[in-house]
């Protein structure tokens, strides 16, 4: 199959995908790939690889989607498609129990979004990674992505891209991390964020504050911090020292 034939076949596949005929598209992609015997144009082959993975992903055939990449030949895709592929592959990794691959592919997606100067996409990718970890009961690993989300809160509300929902979600993920690990550093971050949460009008903020107020771990840490502050206050001067001279 030469590049001209490959391009024509890709147009048929794209048409099937646009019409939600994912099973037909998946079969045609597989058939097309089998007919390629030498390196095709990398950009054309990139579209074939993209549709091959996307069709299997939308069909929720997770192992088929996982095995679609890497392909037999070198391929090129746009940064936008690459970011989607890594994000979607992170989800496939979650569905198939590949935890390390989930972390790696989510991190690659975030890196591409950062290089694209797409902070909104970067935050969404970090949130997606945290949510995938929550779905497989691995909230202990969301520390890989929490700094990306919560770091935005440290920039101040005026610089939050008009989307405080990401940061509110970050604090929810932080609570999940605390429940999973009891990490005192995370508890301190949550306690330090209470003022921001109290001002935030996102629907998640009250939920996070409620969880903070009812968590024994958080309340114990709060009491510990209060005790530490009291101990740091110097004692009042003794009455003998300041007694007037006779």
Image (spheres, rainbow, N blue to C red):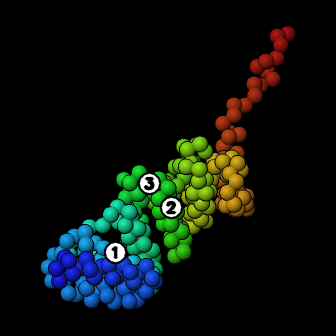
One can see residue 3 in this view: yes
Could you tell me how many numbered marks the image carries? 3
- Give above or below for 8 relative to 125: below
Q: Which residue is mark 2?
A: 124
Query: Element at badge 1?
Result: helix
Instruction: Give the residue displayed 28% in from the left and 82% down from the top.
Output: 9
Q: Nearer the viewer, residue 221 or 131?
A: 131
Per the image, label 2 sits on a secondary structure element best described as helix
Residue placed at 36% from the left, 53% from the top? 115
Using the numbered discs, state the Cα–Cα distance from disc 1 to disc 2 in whole angstroms: 21 Å
Q: Which residue is the extreme one toward the right? A: 246
| Pair 3/2: label in front | 3
Q: Position of residue 71 (x, y in %)?
A: 25, 77
User: How far apart, in angstroms, are the residues tagged by discs 3 and 2?
Assistant: 10 Å
Could you say which disc has been placed on residue 50 in the image? 1
52 in relation to 151, above or below:
below
Element at badge 3? loop
Q: Quadrant of residue 243?
A: top right
Decide which of tag 1 and tag 2 comes sooner along the chain: 1
Q: Residues within 10 Å of mark 3 (few under 14, many from 20)?
A: few
Of 35 and 163, the residue lying toward us: 35
Residue 23 in the image: state x and y as whole percent: 40, 89
Q: Quadrant of the C terminus?
A: top right
Quote the CA–CA distance across marks 1 and 3: 21 Å
Name the residue that disc number 3 marks: 118
Q: Judge depth for marks 1 and 2 and give the one in front.
A: 1
182 in relation to 188, above or below: below
| Residue drawn at (66%, 43%) of the image | 228
Q: Sequence order check: which comes first, mark 3 or mark 2? A: 3
Residue 84: image quadrant is bottom left
Categorize mark 2 by other alpha carbons within 10 Å: few (<14), some (14-19), many (20+): some
């Amino acid at each position: 199959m030469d590049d001209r034939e490959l391009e024509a076949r890709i147009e048929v596949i794209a048409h099937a995908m646009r019409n939600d005929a994912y099973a037909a598209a998946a079969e045609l992609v597989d058939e097309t790939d089998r007919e390629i015997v030498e390196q095709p144009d990398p950009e054309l082959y990139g579209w074939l690889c993209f549709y091959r993975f996307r069709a299997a992903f939308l069909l929720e055939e997770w192992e088929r989607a996982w095995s679609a990449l890497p392909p037999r030949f070198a391929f090129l895709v746009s940064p936008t498609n690459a970011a989607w592929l890594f994000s979607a592959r992170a989800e496939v990794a979650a569905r198939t129990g590949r935890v390390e691959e989930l972390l790696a592919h989510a991190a690659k997606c975030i890196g591409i979004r950062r290089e694209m100067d797409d902070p909104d996409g970067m935050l969404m990718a970090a949130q997606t990674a945290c949510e995938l970890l929550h779905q497989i009961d691995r909230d202990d690993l969301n520390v890989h992505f929490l700094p990306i989300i919560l770091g935005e809160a440290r920039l101040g509300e005026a610089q939050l891209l008009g989307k405080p929902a990401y940061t509110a979600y970050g604090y929810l993920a932080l609570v999940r991390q605390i429940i999973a690990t009891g990490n005192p550093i995370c508890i301190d971050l949550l306690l330090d964020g209470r003022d921001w949460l109290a001002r935030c009008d996102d629907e998640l903020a009250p939920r996070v504050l409620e969880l903070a107020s009812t968590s024994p771990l958080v309340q114990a840490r709060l009491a510990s911090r209060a005790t530490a502050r009291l101990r740091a206050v110097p004692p009042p001067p003794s009455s003998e020292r300041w007694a007037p001279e006779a």
